[in-house]
Image: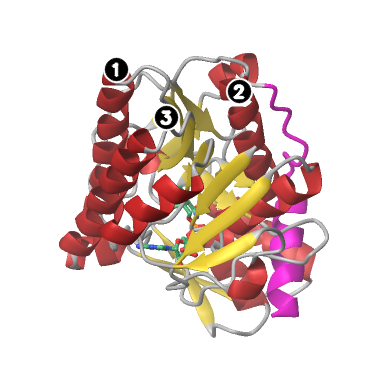
Amino acid sequence: MKILVTGGAGYIGSHVVKQLGEAGGFDITVLDNLSTGFEDSVLYGKLVKADLSDFAFVERFLLDERFEAIIHFAASIVVPESVENPLKYYMNNTVNTTNLIRCAVASGVKSFVFSSTAAVYGEAASGVVTEESLLAPINPYGHSKLMSEQVLRDTVAAHNGFNVVVLRYFNVAGASMDARIGQRFPNATHLIKVACESACGKRQKMYIFGDDYPTNDGTCVRDYIHIEDLASAHLAALDYLKQGGRSDVFNCGYGRGYSVKEVVETVKKVSGVDFEAELAPRRAGDSSLLISNNQKILKTLEWKPKFDDLNLICKSAYEWEKSL
Ligand SMILES: NC(=O)c1ccc[n+]([C@@H]2O[C@H](COP(=O)([O-])OP(=O)(O)OC[C@H]3O[C@@H](n4cnc5c(N)ncnc54)[C@H](O)[C@@H]3O)[C@@H](O)[C@H]2O)c1
């Protein structure tokens, strides 16, 4: 299968490229502007350094290459930055994605897998969310992704033969089990990454934002998914579309959650470092509990998660952080 992976030099994209390469049978091209990605994270295929905002290039490139499938990761992903600079997010995530979809349809792409996020559920969603739960993002990042989902939905309805799987990721963490690749971009805001940086002495301390939420220990609960399992969901989605599966949306999580305190304690345990985690006031926009109902993906795709274990997730993230 001739496949284009946009953003394949980034954290999640590079893991998917690795799994595609290991699986065999894929002719892989990565398109990435290396704004937050790394050339040497691309372990398989050909890297084309280009920007999705270059519409003329993207159109020509897709018409020339005639990809059968696209997995689209390229995006800007920092929530607070999206509040300060919303236009960057609407341009890079919504406008560039819309153009990519236009070029994909024009060049005869059959299968399209899109990286979406639990951020489309927003603050109103507190609890276990299904794909049918209320979509109400609370920041420009979430809106920019939901708008792309809408463009995809409308395009699928209008264009026979263009099929799409939207994967809504919950909290992605960890590194490849062989420790070759992992989350590298500095100043990440993800809890497990921040805790591992603290354990490695790269931060003096970290903060726990709020301990008065209506959860067991008062801190927010999230559904953490290991990067290797998230990556394998993309291969399962491609296979599903290839077998004639109809366009659909799937939550990607384990269907259970851990609190901030539990994560911090686990990172302390696996690292053996008692780093400082200071209690701070709640942050605006954090819901108390956000967990995926993952029944749909388990029933529909050939996807079997293998690393549903917080110790293992934190250990792989910590080992990777130490190696940087
Ligand atoms: N990391 C998470 O926890 C998480 C959660 C939910 C959804 N997602 C989604 O997953 C996708 C990948 O996220 P990630 O964590 O790997 O981020 P990342 O920043 O590591 O990867 C994004 C990649 O896209 C590239 N890129 C960005 N804009 C581009 C453009 N205009 N043209 C070409 N390349 C461009 C970057 O250089 C980078 O390699 C994103 O779409 C994000 O919204 C991530």
Residue 218 screen position, x and y as percent: 46, 47
> In the image, what residue type sits under mark 2?
Lys
**Residue occupying the point 29% across, 17% down:** 157
**If you read the primary sequence from the N terminus, does the residue marked by circle 2 or circle 1 appear first?**
1
- Against 239, residue 79 (above or below) is below
Q: Is residue 320 magenta?
A: yes
> In the image, what residue type sits under mark 1?
Ala
Which of discs 2 and 3 lies nearer the camera? The answer is 2
**If you read the primary sequence from the N terminus, does the residue marked by circle 1 or circle 3 appear first?**
3
**Residue occupying the point 54% across, 35% down:** 68
Q: Which residue is mark 3?
A: 127
Q: Secondary structure at mark 3?
A: strand
Cα gap from disc 1 to disc 3, whole angstroms: 31 Å
Where is the N terminus found, in terms of image quarters? top right
- Determine contact: label 2, label 3, CB under 8 Å: no
- Against 146, residue 65 (above or below) is below
Q: Which residue is mark 1?
A: 157
Where is the C terminus found, in terms of image quarters? bottom right
Which residues fall within the magenta stretch?
302-324
The answer to whether one can see residue 142 in this image is no
In depth, the one of 313 and 97 nearer the eye is 97
Q: Which residue is mark 2?
A: 242
In depth, the one of 47 and 203 nearer the eye is 47
Q: Secondary structure at mark 1?
A: helix
- Determine contact: label 1, label 3, CB under 8 Å: no
Quarter of the render that holds ligand 1: bottom left
Which colour style is shown? Answer: secondary structure
**If you read the primary sequence from the N terminus, does the residue marked by circle 2 or circle 3 appear first?**
3
Cα gap from disc 2 to disc 1, whole angstroms: 18 Å
In depth, the one of 202 and 50 nearer the eye is 50
**Residue occupying the point 28% across, 53% down:** 96
Label 3 CA crowd tier, 10 Å (few <14, some 14–19, many 20+)? some
